[in-house]
Structure formats: C-alpha cells, structure tokens
Amino acid sequence: MQRNVERKFRILSIAAVFVAISLINIIISASKSLTDDTSTIALPKSDTVVHQKQHKVYCHSSNTTATDCFLCLRDRPTSLYHASNKNVSKRLILTDDPHEEEVIWATSDWVNILPLVNESMQMRMQRRHHGNSTTSIDEIDPNWKIFVLEYSDLGVGDRGLSYIRNNFVPLVGWKRIHWITRSTKVGRYMDRCAKKTYVDFGPCLGERLNFTEMLNESVASVQTLHFASRDDIANAIDEYVKQQNQSLYEATAKNNSGLGISYDLSQAIAGLPRQTDVNTFWNEDACNNFCSMRNGMADACRSMPQRYNLSLTVSTRVVGHKRKRGRKHAHPNYIKALLSSKIIVLAQRDRWEDHFRLDEALLSGALVMTDPQLIYPHGIIVDGDHQNIVVYHSILEMEIKIRYYLNPRNEEERIQIGQRGRELALTHHRIWQLAERLLLNDMTYRDEYGVSNKPW
C-alpha cells in the first residue's frame, strides 16, 4: 500500500513539474510577444511612422491690419510661403480654403477674422447636421484648430485672452482655440540695472505671467512664441562662403551628411579667421526708446580697450539696412560683419524679451553673448558640455567673459560654442520648425513654457 502511495505521489509530482514548465513557457512566450508589439508601437525607428501625416494650414491675412500673421507674409524671409527652400516643412501644407475639415488656422488679425470664423462655423454645422443643430459646438469638426498669434513686442498678455473669451468662444467654443504670444512675462525693467556695472540683472528680469487660472473655458492652450532664424541670412552666409572658398563649399556639398550644406558648413564657418574681436551691431545713436540696456552694453564694450589697457578690436556700428527694411533684406555688409566677428554681444530691449538679432548672430558661427531671459528659445543651453550660447548676468560678468573667450588658450572652446549655436539655429529655429512645434502640439516643446487644459 505504501509503495503504491509513493508511486502515485512521484507521478503527480512529475506531472506537476511538467505543467509548471508548460505554464512558464506560455507566460514567457506571451510576454515576449507583448514586448515586441509594444516596442514596435511605442518606439518607432524612423520618422516614417510618426511624422509623415500632413496637416493643412490656412494662414489668414488681411490688408486692413498691419499685424498680419508672421507665417503668411510672402515678402518676409521667415514664412512658410518660401516653398523653394529645401528645409520647408513637409508636415504643414498651406491651403487657401479655410473651410476644409481638420484644417489649422493661424492668424494675428483678431478683429477682421471674426466674420470668417462665424461663416466657417455655420458651413461646418450644415455639413455635419444638414440643418439639425442639436450637436454641441465642440463636436463640430473638433480637429479644426484656430491659433491666434500675438506677435508684437509689448503685447497684450491676459487682455488678449479676455478678448478671445468674449468674441471667439461664443462662435466656436474654447476647445479649438489656442493662444500663442510673446507676452508671457511681466515686470521686466532692465533700464534699472543697465548702468550698474556690478549689479546682477536678476531683480530686473520680471516674472512669468500665470496663465493657469485664465485658461478655464477661454482657450485650450497658451504657448510662448519666439522669433525664428531668417532664411535669407542663412542663404546669404552660404553664398558668402561659396564665393570666398569655392573648393570648401563644393567639398561640403559633395560629402554632406544629409542635414544640408548649411549645417555641414558650420564647423568651417565657426573656424573662419575673424578680424573683429567684439561686435555689438548697436550704439546709443541707434535708439533712445527702451534701449538703456543695449546702450549700456555697447558703451561698456566700446570702452573696454581703454579701461583695461587691452589690444581689442571692438565695433559698435550699425551695419546694413536699419529697422523694417533690415528685417526683409540681407545686406552684404551685414553678412560680412557677422562672419568677421569672434564674439557678438547682444542685449534685448528694456521691457521685453527676444529679438531677431539673436538667431542672426547664431547663424554667423560667432560666439554669441546675451543678457539673460526668463524663457529661452527652444534648445538654448547656457552652460555645460553642450553649451551653445553665453549669458552674462551683469556688465562686469560680460567683460570678464569677453576677456576669457578672447584668450588664445580658450579659442577652441569659443569656436565650438559658436558652431553649436549655428547648428541649433539651423536645425531647430527655422520658421517651419517653430510652426510645427506650436501648431502640431509637440509635447517635448511644452515643458519649456506652455499651459494647456489637457493634451489635444
């Protein structure tokens, strides 16, 4: 009897082992299959999986307003209309039909666009319901998005949101409306710190606007807008190098990495022999309106050779076209001056952040120094191994850093920072790249500054 019991126990034990092994194999197989499927979906190996969908963009522009949408202006070197440029977006396709389904609108003409908004909403309702108006506004073409851009220097901040809430929301609801603005900061008064050589700029930088409480049923998101790199400046720099060094240009064109000749020229451009040690492209004769910081910076640079008994070549001349004409045309003397400068020192207006000169300087391959910002443009790295710009927090710190980077022992570091700055401007700051991040809800950009009710 005992032997029979032991034999049955051994049989059951062996059977249990086989069952356990089978279950383990099944679990492992299922787990491997799940892992493989997840990897394929969550970790695409190329842009062909994620980035090939094209989105139609309607740029609204009116002749009755001076503040047309920056994406739409055909005569500007920062526009999606420059379709001949090989770097133009393959994801944003311009359309002239504002009433298409799932179209993205972009406008800075808040008043004159309202009748068109109302007309388009009525057409979409008729398409959807054939006269039946029982469906809520938010359910009518939910993928029709309207981006209202506030692009001026001083801006309107939260007052713009109030206008949208009172005028746009009753027509189309708030979930499709997005507010893009340069007015995301308040309280910047750099004139208070400009002439104090030893004082840190921190107390004069202001603070971020808190849009969180303003979002509720006003707009779906608020995004920071920065100026973009100008195509005409980038192209003029390429042409200058082509004329000055044909063999270098042709060798680069033949062996380029696929990112474009402009990008591959970056190392050579950053390492060009440069005659001017410091250039500001600014002086006190150029402006007396919100220019205390700029003028103070230029004065300090100009007087450095005398005050420190240094052999420095400093230029504070304004080169090329001035004001609006300079924003539409690349003057050859300006291009030459950019490429002849080792260090370009910049400063922003006293009351607001950001300016075109920043990316123009970055494109030159020079080391770019600037006063601090609360919110830097996408990809700016101010310190560390991947630094692509140098920030000074006082006039004294600016002078110390100028002397440091002009020391022959630090020349290679200066050139590398200049090269990385140029590469950033070319690969992340073109107008179509900025537009893709803003209009297509790139969540990797959202952490720099963006407020949203929810991902959309």
Image (cartoon, grey):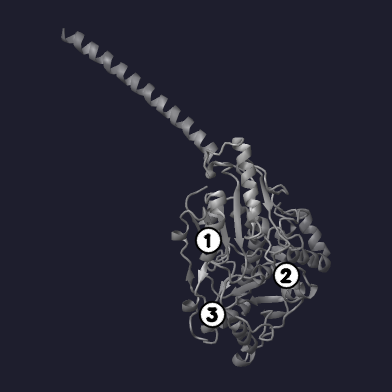
Residue 406 lies, with reference to residue 116, above or below; the image says below
Q: Residue 232, image x and y in percent?
A: 76, 64
Q: Amino acid at mark 2?
A: Arg
Mark 1 Cα within 10 Å, few/some/many (few <14, many 20+)? Answer: many
Mark 1 or mark 2, which is nearer the start of the sequence?
1
Task: Please state which amino acid type lies under the numbered disc 1.
Answer: Leu
Q: Which residue is mark 3?
A: 190
Q: Secondary structure at mark 2?
A: loop
User: Which of the two discs, 2 and 1, sits closer to the camera?
Assistant: 1
Q: How many marks?
A: 3
Q: Nearer the viewer, mark 1 or mark 3?
A: 1
Query: Compared to 271, does 132 lie above or below?
Result: above
> Which callout, 2 or 3, points at the residue further toward the start of the chain?
3
Residue 29 percent across, percent down from the top left: 45, 27
Contact, mark 1 vs mark 3 (Cβ under 8 Å): no
Q: Residue at x 60, y 43 (%)?
A: 50
* Residue at mark 1: 161
Mark pair 2, 3: CA separation? 24 Å
| 214, above or below 341, in the image | above
Which residue is label 2 attached to?
Answer: 327
Q: Position of residue 5 (x, y in %)?
A: 19, 11
Specify whether residue 74 is in view: yes
**Residue 365 image-quadrant placement:** bottom right
Nearer to me, 284 or 304: 284
**In this image, 292 relative to 279: left or right?**
left
Residue located at (16% from left, 7% from top): 1
2 and 3 marks in contact (CB < 8 Å): no
